[in-house]
Image: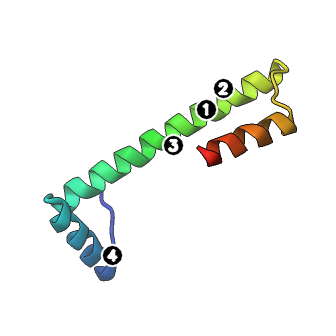
Amino acid sequence: MEVHFTPEQEALLSQIANHAGTDIEQLVKDATLRMVSEDARFLAAVDRGIAAADRGEFVEEEEMDARVERMLLS
């Protein structure tokens, strides 16, 4: 597989890789795998949420507002 970047993008990737103590190829591989993993986790959470909603498991708006407020205050 090949991925092509503009010279400016390559320069930025090189700078980031140097700072991280790795090479560009490894940096891109690691970043791509993290992104794919996070996407998979997000989609699984969405599926769980949809399944819960299909079962009628909801949190009322007022309760959600209270939860968010408590989270922001802590």
The answer to which image quadrant residue 67 occupies is: top right
In terms of sequence position, does the residue under pointer 3 or pointer 1 come before the other?
Answer: 3
The residue indicated by pointer 3 is 39
- Are circles 3 and 1 on residues that touch, CB within 8 Å? no
The residue indicated by pointer 2 is 48
Q: Quadrant of the C terminus?
A: top right
In terms of sequence position, does the residue under pointer 1 or pointer 4 come before the other?
Answer: 4
In terms of sequence position, does the residue under pointer 4 or pointer 3 come before the other?
Answer: 4
- Are circles 2 and 1 on residues that touch, CB within 8 Å? yes
Report the number of numbered marks.
Answer: 4
**Neighbour tally class for label 3: few under 14, some 14-19, many 20 plus, Cα within 10 Å:** few
Q: Nearer the viewer, residue 64 or 50?
A: 64
| Disc on res. 45 | 1
Three-letter code for the amino acid on which mark 3 is drawn: Asp
Disc 4 element: helix
The residue indicated by pointer 4 is 9
Colour scheme in use: rainbow
Three-letter code for the amino acid on which mark 1 is drawn: Ala
Task: Give the CA separation, mark 4 to mark 3.
Answer: 23 Å
Picture coordinates of residue 30, whole percent (x, y) = 29, 49
Q: Residue at x 29, y 81 (%)?
A: 7
